[in-house]
Structure formats: structure tokens, C-alpha cells
Amino acid sequence: MTIFQYNFPTRIQFGPGAVRGLAPALAEMGKKRPLIVTDRGLAPLAPVTRTRDELAQAGLDVAVFSGVWGNPVKSQVTAGVAAFKAHGADSIVGLGGGAAIDVAKAILLMVNHPGDLFEYEDEKPGARPIDREIPYWVSVPTTAGTGSEVGRSTVISDDETHVKKIIFSPKLLAARVFLDPELTLELPAAVTAATGMDALTHLVEAYLAKGFQPLCDGIALAGTKLVAQGLPRAVDFARRIERGEKALAHAPEHVEARGQMLNAATMGGVAFQKGLGVTHSLAHALSTVCDLHHGLANGIAIPYAMSFNASVAAERLTDLARMVGAKEQSARGFVVWLEELRQDIGIPQDLRAAGVRDEHLDRLVQIAVADACHPNNPRPVSESDFRALFRQALGAS
């Protein structure tokens, strides 16, 4: 099978079996003691065990840290730093979903930097500088959602308050990225849908974000088209496999759809360097207050958010409608396409179906107003706007 290589700026290898280039890449850099950082649920499964064994067979002394789960918190990072030092690691392989890759970046930061992780929070007054060596690391995503594999930031929550903190530095970019669709073929339909909506939200919000960044705009449009082509098919294959059609796992059309989604997620991770918007502020609040999966929160919220933006971003929403092949090529047509996609892939139609309740509203609004994403939204978002959006998403009239 063909493995494609492209740089933007990170060196990316893409294609079925791309992860087999991991051991040679580490050896090329003289690394001998990698630490795999991964999700607790993924650790006993083939993507991790096979990768660990292949690294060991190549003569590398490999260890696994699997203390990542849910929305990542600082204590997971602290435990990961201890594991890195206990192994005498010289590199990290971030292998898993966005949570594992974000924790990997935070571990890398804290290996050689003093103090507390949150002292490095982006734009915090008096924040410590990120000015020391970051150990060599490579990224291997096993979901197609966050785009964290090509990102320059990590998002970690406070253990007590669950408030998300963003740490940013170009030093956190991975040295290499391996996009291997074979690692995503067994993802459940629900995970495929939620992570796919995360990728889509990055792309859509990047295209609408304020500012002039034509490179990101072009990537966002092309990535949105890939989601429209790949996400419904990937979810459909996952459902059929879950119903017992196991032979479909490696069907060429399934591999193709998973590859489209991996590239779309990576493109989203590049595009949203331009900025995000109101959907992410809604979603960050939902993850903080209700511990909702980030991609699921985005998937529920995005039609409401794009309806809110339609009055000021109709032209760009129409561009997106054309790109995805919406029945009506207009701002409203794109919102309808989002609603239909959400229903087709099994994302709940409102927040109440995801366990959010009216009593959460005040805290949700408080967190969303303070979030750093909505200032880039094309339409300003007030406290009363956030309250109205959450009420709409709860199914209130």
C-alpha cells in the first residue's frame, strides 16, 4: 500500500500501515527508550499492543503510560511525568485520541520546566516562559477529531474546578505525525460520530473566524468537503461492523472513509490556528460543567451556533453549503445539512438528550462567557446570547 508524505510544517506520513514507520523514525533520531502515552481504554487493544511490540522487536526499550481517561486533568500529567522519569525515557509516542495527545504534550513540557503546569497557561499575566528543551516526540492519532497531532497547544483541565487551561507554544509541535487509517477501523460508531463532529466544527469555525488568513480558509473548505464525504460512510461502516458484518472492517471503502476523516481532522488542527468561535465556547462550558465529551458537545451545539451566525456570515455559510453539497446552497441550507448529518450519524438533537438540565444553565453561561474562543466569532456573543443559545440547545422555546 502507498504511504504518502507531506509537510505542513510537521512531517506527516499517511496511509494504511503508516505506523510501521514509527520505529525507523525513532531510530533515525537515535532514540532508544520511548514512552507511549495512551488512553486507559485503548492500552490493552491492538493499536497500542501491536505498536509496543513492533518497537520492542526493533530493539527499543519501550514503556507504556496509560493513565489518561475522559477530559484530561493535571493529575494525569503529573503521573505521566513521573512515568517518563522512572523509565528514563528519551522520547514520547503520543498514541490515542485527543486526550492522550494533549497529555503527552503537557508531560513533554513539564519534564524540563519547573513549577506548576498551569503557571504556563497561555496569556496568563506573569506566565512562565516555555524556554527549555522539549523532548523528541511523535504523534499517532487513533481517532479523527481534535487535530491535536499537528497542534501547538494542549488543553488540560483543573482536577477540582474542571476549568480548561490552554498551554501554547510552537515548541509543542510533534516532530513527526503518522496518520494510519488502519488504527481507526475498529472505532465504535458513537465515537466515530462524536470525534468527526469535532473535526467538522474546527473546520467550519476556522472558516468563519474573524481575521484574514486565506491559507487556513482554503484548508478549512477542503477539509469540510472531506468530512461530508467520509463521516457518514465511516459511521455507517462502524454500525454494520457492530451488527456483526466483521468482514467490512478492512473493506477498501471503509479504509478510504477513515483516511478521509484522519486528513480532515488534521486539516482542522491546522485551520483553527486562525481561530474558533461560539460553538467551542458552548462546548467548553458543557465539558466543564457536565463532563460532556467535547466532540459530542460540538456536534449538538453547532447547528444552533451557525443559525446564530447566519445574519453576519451568510456568504461564508453559503460557501460551506456548496462545499458539502447541501440541497439548498444558502446559509440556511448549510444549517439544515448540519441538522440532517447530526441525525444521520446519531448525535442527539438537543442537550437534554445528553443529560444536560435547566439547573446547569447559570454555570454554563458563566463558563462560556469567560471562554477564549468566542471573541473570534464573526458575530459578537453577549451573556444574554449565550443564555438564549443554551436554552435553544436544551429544547426550550
Image (cartoon, rainbow, N blue to C red):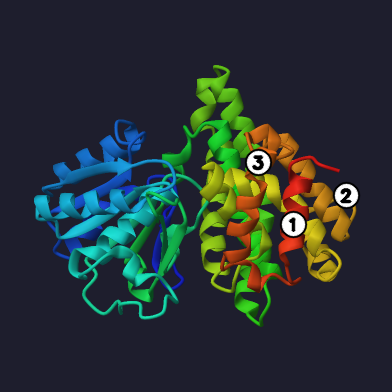
Q: Amino acid at mark 2?
A: Lys
Q: Which residue: 65% across, 73% down? A: 376
From where the camera sits, is residue 280 visible? Answer: no
Q: Amino acid at mark 1?
A: Ala
Whole-angstrom CA distance, mark 1 to mark 3, is: 21 Å
Q: Secondary structure at mark 3?
A: helix
- Name which of mark 1 and mark 3 comes first in the sequence: 1
- Name which of mark 3 and mark 2 comes first in the sequence: 2
Q: Which residue: 85% across, 67% down? A: 314
Give the labeled residue for mark 2. Answer: 327
Residues marked 3 and 2 touching at CB (< 8 Å): no
Disc number placed over residue 305 in the picture, else none: 1
Q: Amino acid at mark 3?
A: Glu
Q: Nearer the viewer, mark 2 or mark 1?
A: 1
Give the labeled residue for mark 3. Answer: 359
Residues marked 1 and 3 touching at CB (< 8 Å): no
